[in-house]
Amino acid sequence: MDLTGKNVVYLGGFGGIGQKACAQLLERQIKALAIFDLTLNEQLLAAWQAQYPNTDIFYQKVDITQKSEIEAAYKAAAERLGHFDVVVNGIGLMNDNFVELTIQINLLGLIQSSFIALEHMDKSKSGRGGVVINISSVAGIQPTPLMSVYSAAKHGVTAFTRGLGSAQFYEQTGVAFITVCPGFTDTPLLFDMMNKMTFKPRTTIDKHTHKVQSPEICASNLVKVIEQGKNGSVWLLELGEMKELDMPVMWRPTLQS
Ligand SMILES: NC(=O)c1ccc[n+]([C@@H]2O[C@H](COP(=O)([O-])OP(=O)(O)OC[C@H]3O[C@@H](n4cnc5c(N)ncnc54)[C@H](O)[C@@H]3O)[C@@H](O)[C@H]2O)c1
């Protein structure tokens, strides 16, 4: 997709990866950027509005655990923009101390947001089609025992997004669903990792014991996925590289003869 002149909704646009991805999107001369997030970064918003006067950039407060807030934000953005071409579900929480919240924020909220986005974008209804990018994780393709709850939520994100990325749905809705799986990325999500794990590990684990990528390079590859990714594809964004994954087929239904 050529991003020039496109309307983009970014959920989590003021987060570590989100900020850098929004900055890259603005460089692509998009027409509008709606940022849905829990808190407003007033300074950053004002700086972007001054730097990109030809792009309509605005904020909608959303607590992703509240379906009514997600619906209200999409409704307000739709009234202002008319339609969306790209939605990025980039909100996340990594803290296995909070089991329900981890599932609510990473999985349930993302599912609700995807369905509401689809209502607006589905070309078989009143939409024009487009792309929904759901941010999963390496923990969404490989179980990570240190973060078992987060990993379960992210596996859910990968499964849900691949499900909606079926060719059959795409033909009907014109909305492509793409899964993005970043590896460790240097953002606030990784702060205080030792105290956020499923069980307290015996040895220290933090961003200094593992190689991490910068949020800039992760965001740059994320934007390339929006431009190049096909419906149903799954992308690994690890240590500055991007790679489309060939997902194994573990089971197929047996049809009645
Ligand atoms: N940083 C990493 O190592 C890493 C690795 C793999 C995947 N990811 C995923 O990338 C995405 C972005 O993460 P990040 O590293 O930029 O994290 P971050 O903590 O910097 O940003 C998280 C964003 O989510 C928002 N958020 C949190 N709770 C919310 C709520 N209840 N309602 C609305 N917004 C809420 C925050 O305001 C923030 O904008 C997440 O989905 C995360 O799981 C991150």
Image (tube, rainbow, N blue to C red):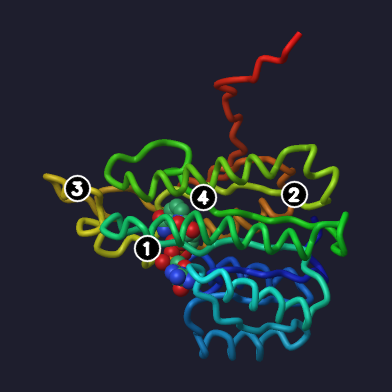
Residue 42 horizontal side relative to residue 202, left or right: right
Does the closest atom of ligand 1 sit within 8 Å of the Cβ of label 4? yes
Identify the element where label 1 is drawn.
Answer: helix
Q: How far from the left and from the top, in percent, is residue 239?
A: 46, 47
The residue pinned by badge 1 equals 189
Residue 136: which numbered mark, if any?
4
In terms of sequence position, does the residue under pointer 2 or pointer 1 come before the other? 2
Q: Which of these two is toward me, 192 or 250?
A: 250
Whole-angstrom CA distance, mark 2 to mark 4, is 16 Å
SS at mark 4? Answer: loop
Residue type beneath disc 4? Ser
Work out whether 76 lies above or below 171.
below
Q: Is mark 1 within 8 Å of ligand 1?
A: yes
Looking at this view, name the residue that lies furthest to the left.
202
Q: Is residue 203 above or below residue 2?
A: above
Relative to 147, residue 7 above or below: below
Earlier-in-chain disc, 3 versus 2: 2
Label 1 is placed on what type of residue? Leu
Query: What's the residue at 63%, 20% (across, down)?
Result: 252
Residue of label 3: 199
Secondary structure beneath dot 2 equals strand
Q: Earlier in the sequence, mark 4 or mark 3?
A: 4
Amino acid found under the numbered disc labelled 2? Ala
